[in-house]
Image (spheres, rainbow, N blue to C red):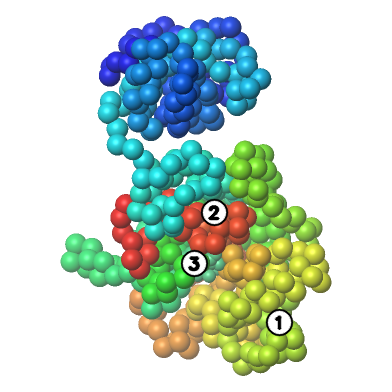
């Protein structure tokens, strides 16, 4: 074996760990990170990690063993050698007679052992060292599941005639509520980081009828909880020509089924590694009206939340357990939230004007999605803003869409990190976020 700091040109193309079985007896080149080194008396095993998995490399020649034994884990290596069948090797194949070249040069050891089956570090340590910690197969798996989820989201909506849009993340007014916006200085003007693409996705219904967006949104959340981030990934949908919010809920049902199927298909190994219990998405997700949910809580818990305008996290957990018990469903729609708790663009419930044509979707105890029908007539917007004591001037850009004709429409937004956390059983959505931004964290 020879260790040289430079890449030596070779005509052999790189193969991945997953392809070893197709090259038995052949000379191959593999490249990746030194995941683990096991130094025994008569042999050194190098376990190389690439994007497809792990390869075992056997070093038996004495001088080569000394050099291999001196390598630090996470060194990036290029190894040429012969693929040999060995039932004892992980996966049944290994690389023998290796020539090893370092591509990274000298490296520092990782902050904790990346080869241990479970992550031997606390959440703060993981987050502090995220660029390296995320290489751990279990931590990487969370993000493979997120990626597969987004692929399913896109594929489903593409097939339903939606167009993907990309809207500004710096805006001139709050979209959800005034309280939790990040104010920034935009060339001397007041501006905010977008809390959601709400106004833009509605305006784009006027252009494409059906749109979706996946992108970052920002909430100046002062809460230090396991389910709030200051930046998260919002999967947004908006569609025109609906009768009411039920049509939006039907699209959401299709999206959830497609996301689940995509995770099953595209992140199979990640699901196995994390023992993910994928949900069944019922043909009809059960639903309960907000007023009935409160009555249920009053009847079955020691609290009486009637009169409150929103559900507390404990109420959401109770209702989720109820849906699982009564309907065998991991999902529950709560419809008809009080108008006072919803943003000004919300459509009231006909005949029950204190309530709205809106919904939240609870998934395994947590609010995952908010959505509903919107106002679509210009005069209704002027009236809604006046009722809340807000000036239409602030929203002139947004209101232009309605002044020039908009169809009945509605949509929803799903928090990607919450979805992945509920799928994988992560106790904190920071585990499903690559580089979380919160009250205390702005780096790495
Ligand atoms: P809402 O503000 O309820 O609705 O947000 C929608 C979904 O986004 C997720 N979410 C969060 N995830 C992590 N950290 C946070 N701080 C956070 N806040 C919200 C949740 C939530 O259900 N414009 C509307 C949606 C619509 O009506 O289309 C909106 O943004 O999963």
Q: Quadrant of the N terminus?
A: top left
Side (left or right) of 223 relative to 353? left
Residue 272 sits in which quadrant? Answer: top right
Residue at (71, 55) in percent of width and height: 279
Q: Is residue 433 above or below residue 131?
A: below
Determine whether label 3 and label 1 are within 8 Å by CB: no
Badge 3 is on which residue? 226
Q: Which mark is residue 293?
A: 1
Badge 2 is on which residue? 212
Side (left or right) of 63 relative to 309? left
Alpha carbon distance from label 3 to label 2: 27 Å
Determine whether label 3 and label 2 are within 8 Å by CB: no
Label 3's element? loop
Going from N to C along the chain, the mark reached first, 3 or 2, is 2
Label 1 crowd bin: few (<14), some (14–19), many (20+), radius 10 Å: many
**Which sits in the foreground, 200 or 330?**
330
Residue 340 sits in which quadrant? Answer: bottom right
Alpha carbon distance from label 3 to label 1: 24 Å
Label 1's element? helix
**Which sits in the foreground, 303 or 370?**
303
Q: Where is residue 241 drawn, in percent x and y?
A: 65, 62
Side (left or right) of 89 relative to 123? right
């Amino acid at each position: 074996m020879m260790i040289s700091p430079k890449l030596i040109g070779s005509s052999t193309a790189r193969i991945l760990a997953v392809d070893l079985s197709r090259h038995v007896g052949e000379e191959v080149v593999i490249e990746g990170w030194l995941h683990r080194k096991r130094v025994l008396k008569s042999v050194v095993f190098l376990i190389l990690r690439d994007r497809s998995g792990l390869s075992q490399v056997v070093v038996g020649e004495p001088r080569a063993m000394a050099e291999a034994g001196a390598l630090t884990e996470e060194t990036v290596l290029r190894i040429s050698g012969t693929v040999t069948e060995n039932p004892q090797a992980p996966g049944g194949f290994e690389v023998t007679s290796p020539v090893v070249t370092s591509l990274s040069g000298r490296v520092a050891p990782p902050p904790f052992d990346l080869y241990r089956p479970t992550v031997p570090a606390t959440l703060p340590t993981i987050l502090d060292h995220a660029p390296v910690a995320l290489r751990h197969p279990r931590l990487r798996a969370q993000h493979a599941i997120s990626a597969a989820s987004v692929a399913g989201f896109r594929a489903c909506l593409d097939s339903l005639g939606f167009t993907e849009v990309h809207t500004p993340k710096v805006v001139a007014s709050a979209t959800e509520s005034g309280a939790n916006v990040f104010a920034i200085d935009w060339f001397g003007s007041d501006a905010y980081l977008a809390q959601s693409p709400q106004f833009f996705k509605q305006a784009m219904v006027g252009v494409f009828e059906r749109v979706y967006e996946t992108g970052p949104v920002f909430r100046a959340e002062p809460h230090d909880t396991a389910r709030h981030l200051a930046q998260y990934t919002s999967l947004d949908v908006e569609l025109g020509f609906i009768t009411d919010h039920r049509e939006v809920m039907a699209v959401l049902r299709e999206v959830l089924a497609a996301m689940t199927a995509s995770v099953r298909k595209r992140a199979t190994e990640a699901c196995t590694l994390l023992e993910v219990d994928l949900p069944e998405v019922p043909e009809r997700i059960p639903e309960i009206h907000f007023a009935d949910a409160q009555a249920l809580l009053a009847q079955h818990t020691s609290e009486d939340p009637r009169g409150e305008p929103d559900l507390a996290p404990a109420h959401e957990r109770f209702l989720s357990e109820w849906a699982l018990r009564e309907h065998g469903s991991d999902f529950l729609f709560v419809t008809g939230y009080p108008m006072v708790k919803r943003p000004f663009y919300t459509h009231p419930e006909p005949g029950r004007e204190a309530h709205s044509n809106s919904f939240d979707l609870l998934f395994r105890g947590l609010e995952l999605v908010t959505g509903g029908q919107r106002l679509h007539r210009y005069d209704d917007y002027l009236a809604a803003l006046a009722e809340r004591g807000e000036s239409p001037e602030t929203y002139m850009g947004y209101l232009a869409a309605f002044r020039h004709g908009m169809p009945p429409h509605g949509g929803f937004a799903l928090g990607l990190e919450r979805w992945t956390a509920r799928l994988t059983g992560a106790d904190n959505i920071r585990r499903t976020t690559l580089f979380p931004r919160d009250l205390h964290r702005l780096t790495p």
